[in-house]
Amino acid sequence: MSNDRYSIVSISFFGDKLPVEDMEKMTGIKTRYSGLKGTHIKGDPRLAKHKTNVWSSIMFTSSKQGGLTKNIQKIINRMIKNKAKLKKLLKTKGIYGTIYISLEMSVLQGAEIIPVSQLKILSDLNIRLDLDITS
């Protein structure tokens, strides 16, 4: 591992009725991975089948790229353009969204802060925030 700090920020949506083919347009974020219920993960028959539809995108960041807060804001800025559609989608029973953040322990030494304004927008959209801190 390099001496550079890093974090990973991903956005994912799940649900049997999730319109996977529409998610890139709806979120304004490029698709990194998608799968349909009943199909093999990554299309590989050696892997398990998806239990539900899934769509996700991921951003890597380091201290040189402006940090965690900046990438969360990029995701929010893109999604906010279709806020009404996303809110409606996320009110559909069985569909949910999550922002997953993985932080390398040394990132904590740099005092990454997620502003309340970002948390409020995620809450308004009913998007869950998951944190994973690694050493």
Image (cartoon, rainbow, N blue to C red):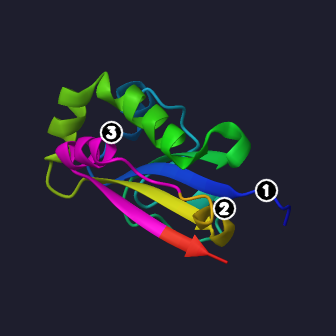
> In what element is the residue under mark 1?
loop
Range shown magenta: 112-131
Q: At which x and y percent is residue 16?
A: 29, 55
Disc 1 packing (10 Å; few <14; some 14–19; many ≥20)? few
The quarter holding residue 27 reads top left
Binning the other alpha carbons within 10 Å of mark 2 as few (below 14), some (14 to 19) or many (20 upward) gives few
Q: Disc 2 vs disc 3: which is toward the camera?
A: 3
In the image shown, does 109 or 70 lie closer to the viewer?
Answer: 109
| Left or right relative to 9: residue 99 | left
Pick whichever, 105 or 76, lies toward us.
105
Query: What mark, if any, has residue 19 been given in the picture?
Result: 3
Please identify, in this view, whether the residue under mark 2 or under mark 1 is nearer the observer: 1
Measured Cα–Cα span from mark 2 to mark 3: 22 Å
Q: Which mark is residue 4?
A: 1
Residue type, mark 3 in image? Pro
Q: Residue 40: tell me if it is visible.
A: no
The tag earlier along the polypeptide, 3 or 1, is: 1
The reply to whether residue 91 is visible in this rendering is yes
Q: Of discs 3 and 1, which sits in the foreground?
A: 1
| Cα separation between marks 2 and 1 | 34 Å
Q: Residue at x 54, y 51 (%)?
A: 9
